Amino acid sequence: MASDDSSPENPVEAAPGKDRSRDRTATERRILDAAQSILTGQGPAGFGVNAVARAAGVDKQLIYRYFGGLDGLLAALGVRLAEWWQDQLLDDAPAQPPGSYGDLIEMLALRLVRIMRREPLALQCLLWELTDGSGPVATLATARAKALGEWMARTRGDLRPPEGVDAPAVNALIISGISCFVLASRTSANVIGLATDQDATWTRVEAAVRALAQGAYGQGPIKTGFRPVGSDR
Amino acid sequence: MASDDSSPENPVEAAPGKDRSRDRTATERRILDAAQSILTGQGPAGFGVNAVARAAGVDKQLIYRYFGGLDGLLAALGVRLAEWWQDQLLDDAPAQPPGSYGDLIEMLALRLVRIMRREPLALQCLLWELTDGSGPVATLATARAKALGEWMARTRGDLRPPEGVDAPAVNALIISGISCFVLASRTSANVIGLATDQDATWTRVEAAVRALAQGAYGQGPIKTGFRPVGSDR
DNA sequence: TATGCATGTCACCAGTAAGTGATATGGGGA
DNA sequence: TCCCCATATCACTTACTGGTGACATGCATA
């Protein structure tokens, strides 16, 4: 994945011929598609003017003209991301409303596990935010935070966390844990002793997520019927 | 922190004169110090042959000769890191042995929070592992995992998690949560709604860590006496 | 038909990266 | 004393990056 980016491996066809469509909005979409594809595949490190232009089969000058450079392109991509998060979270209303605050957080957490596992782009954006907190990248984080917040507001009804439990802090840790774990599973098949390439492991992780949510907000430790087989540190 | 790396901002002095000490082991140490300094300051992205050589005040050729290139240098750094983790974790025996498995995990988790907050190098390594899972970088992860495992083996005594609780999965999520949260606090002053630049927030986070550990392994939700002031999603 | 502008392309710049072959220099052994 | 070798430095190539100015082309309007 180093040098040979000129081969047409992207969804957009890259015929190096003459003036293509002469359609600005279409070209802008091509560029955005390419940017998304690059970010998904190569990650933040590969996200550059040259790479995106090459993938889009377009001169990089157009990126400067139409988006004002990389930052503008990233901002435009952020708008897409925001819509995507809306689709992922908001559009699937819960089958049955949560019965307790613990259920609410469990529901959110499980959704998060599945979304993150399914969508590499979300992971790459998260990684980028962890790497670089400067302005343009921060908008990506904002999109996600907004979608999560709206889902909560819509779903929580009048549920409240139990007295004395610091819900924002606990939730932040649970969400962080899920994010980091899925992120780590992307590059390593063994994360803190769990084989992330096996489906059974993910079943266990989801059960653990439930146990954490209910343990922090519920009435006691959740027995999942888990029986250790190997080392149980 | 971008371009001007030639100024002697590192602990090693960078006099561009003639043959310095003509002492290979000392030179190797200079290079290693510089590499560590670069990684701590600039992160994985800034970790290159030129940058390290410049910071060490040494010709980059020596990096190839003595370490066989960046990968070898990274491996050598990994050895250092392993020792560092040993120092951080193993050498401070717990004041009193944990009374339950929940106490054990709570103890480990709190230690982790403090270590991660204190040592930027640990965070940069973690970030690198999340970015790139290829061989040389993976050794960094191994060093940390080994230190954690040994601490557990030494401290746990004959404590066992409660029946039916999947300790490896729960612990992995707790550790991931701490890692990711501290990592995010490095680049953003507001992580999932928590102001990470205030000491009070970290007190809350530590309490939440305790609540999660005890909630998952203990007898019920932990009341920390927390009283919400603002939004409590 | 002729002009002007939006669209697209090309060629180049300065900067920096990784990597390599040749050269200087000093110290220790024969 | 002389020579050899480990140590250290220099000079260079190749390749890529972000960024910019100049140029070509086609469409719509006057």
Image (cartoon, coloured by chain):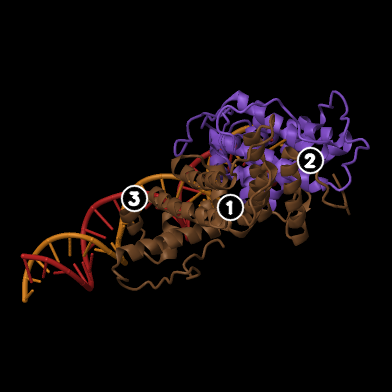
Chain colours: A purple, B brown, C red, D orange
Crowding near the residue tagged with mark 2, few <14, some 14–19, many ≥20 C-alpha atoms within 10 Å: many
Q: Residue at x 47, y 45 (%)?
A: B137
**Chain containing the residue with disc 3:** B
User: Where residue A84 sits: x, y (%)?
Assistant: 74, 33
**Chain containing the residue with disc 2:** A
The span from disc 2 to disc 1 (Cα, nearest Å) is: 27 Å
> Can you name the residue that lies furthest to the right here?
A158
Residue type at the position of mark 2? Ala
| Image quadrant containing the C terminus of chain A | top right
Residue type at the position of mark 1? Leu
Q: Which mark is residue B123?
A: 1
Residues at discs 3 and 2 both on one chain: no
Q: Which mark is residue A73?
A: none
Mark 3 or 1, closer to the camera = 1
Residue type at the position of mark 3? Gly
Q: Give SS at disc 1.
A: helix
Residues at discs 3 and 1 both on one chain: yes
Q: Would you name the residue on which mark 3 appears?
A: B68
User: Where residue A224 sits: x, y (%)?
Assistant: 72, 27
The image quadrant of residue A86 is: top right
Crowding near the residue tagged with mark 1, few <14, some 14–19, many ≥20 C-alpha atoms within 10 Å: many
The span from disc 3 to disc 2 (Cα, nearest Å) is: 50 Å
Return the residue nearer the eye: D16 or A124: A124
User: Where residue B81 sits: x, y (%)?
Assistant: 48, 53
Q: Would you name the residue on which mark 2 appears?
A: A216
